[in-house]
Amino acid sequence: MVDNYEESFGNNIVSVVDENGVEHTFEELDRIETDDGRYIALLPIYDEAEEILDGDGELIILSVVEDEDGETYLEPIEDEALFNEIGEIFEERLADYFEFDEE
């Protein structure tokens, strides 16, 4: 899954268009750059109160990839060890603001 990434709503709100052309809105919580790449932590923003209640509040961590044309995309982190490493970095950085379940 490759998502088109566009910062269209302001500093902390981003719009992501998925591979089916559906637009999703997220709050950008943090971004980091390591020797392995660039990563972003997002939290879904819901339009309806029912969606908020049904949402799991899960932090979404994606890799930021730029293609040769300069387009920026968000992709899942396929490597489990890398995902866990990046997830721990975000959890440490965001621990003062959020509670994380140990799963």
Image: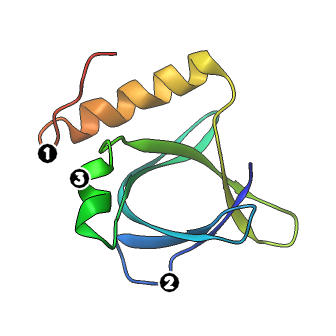
Q: Nearer the viewer, mark 1 or mark 3?
A: 3
- Residue highlighted by disc 1: 97
Q: Position of residue 30 (x, y in %)?
A: 36, 52
Q: Earlier in the sequence, mark 2 or mark 3?
A: 2
Foreground pick, 9 / 37: 9
Left or right of residue 61: residue 28: left
- Residue highlighted by disc 3: 53
Q: Are there few (<14), some (14-19), or many (20+) residues within 10 Å of tag 1?
A: few
Q: Earlier in the sequence, mark 2 or mark 1?
A: 2
Quadrant location of the C terminus in the rendered image: top left
Q: CA distance from mark 2 to mark 3?
A: 26 Å
Left or right of residue 99: residue 6: right
Foreground pick, 35 / 11: 11
- Asked if residue 11 is positioned above or below residue 57 in the image, the reply reads below
The residue lying at 58 percent from left, 15 percent from top is 81
Q: Position of residue 15 (x, y in %)?
A: 52, 73
Foreground pick, 26 / 10: 26
Q: Position of residue 25 (x, y in %)?
A: 45, 69
- Asked if residue 13 is positioned above or below residue 9 in the image, the reply reads above
Residue type at mark 1? Tyr
- Residue highlighted by disc 2: 8
